[in-house]
Image: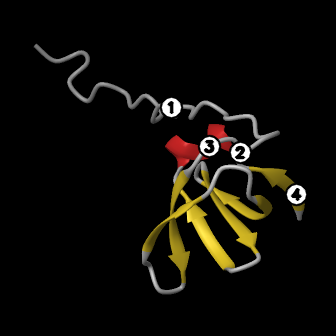
């Protein structure tokens, strides 16, 4: 786990109940997991999920761009036919 400070108030989801709440600016959080750009953090009150669009407000987190993966090209089934 790595410790970080919240740079602004952040909406979050309580784990496991799914209730919405606000984590206050200046709160110390420990990152327990990152998945798909979303971050799970532990604070003194429990576990919370922070959505990808709010992760820039966690000190020391570098937001990575999602890479688009192109499907492999398939041969044109009609090639050679007229």
Q: Residue 7: which numbered mark, if any?
A: none
For residue 8, the mark is: 3
State how far apart marks 1 and 2 are (Cα).
25 Å
Is 59 drawn above or below residue 77 in the view shown?
below
x%, y% of residue 66?
A: 56, 35
| Residue that carries the numbered disc 4 in the rendered image | 3
Q: Which of the two discs, 1 and 2, sits closer to the camera?
A: 2
Label 3, secondary structure: give it: loop
Q: Kindly indicate the quadrant of the structure image that contains residue 50.
A: bottom right
Rendered residue at 52%/53% (across/down): 51
- Of the numbered discs 4 and 3, the one sitting upstream in the chain is 4
Mark 2 and mark 3 residues within 8 Å of each other at the beta carbon: no
From the image, state whether disc 3 or disc 1 is nearer to you: 3
In the rendered structure, the answer to whether residue 23 lies left or right of residue 42 reads: left
**Is the C-beta separation of discs 4 and 3 under 8 Å?**
no
Mark 2 vs mark 3: in front: 3
Q: Who is closer to the viewer here, 9 or 30?
A: 9
Q: CA distance from mark 2 to mark 4?
A: 10 Å
Q: Which residue is mark 1?
A: 68
Kind of element beneath mark 1 = loop
Q: CA distance from mark 2 to mark 3?
A: 8 Å
Which dot marks residue 58? Answer: 2
């Amino acid at each position: 786990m790595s410790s970080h400070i919240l740079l602004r108030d952040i909406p979050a989801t309580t784990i496991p109940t799914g209730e919405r709440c606000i984590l206050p600016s200046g709160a110390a959080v420990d990152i327990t997991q990152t998945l798909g750009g979303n971050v799970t953090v532990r604070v003194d009150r429990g576990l919370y999920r922070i959505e990808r669009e709010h992760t820039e407000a966690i000190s020391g987190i570098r937001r990575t761009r999602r890479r688009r993966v192109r499907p492999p090209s398939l041969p044109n089934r009609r090639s050679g036919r007229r």
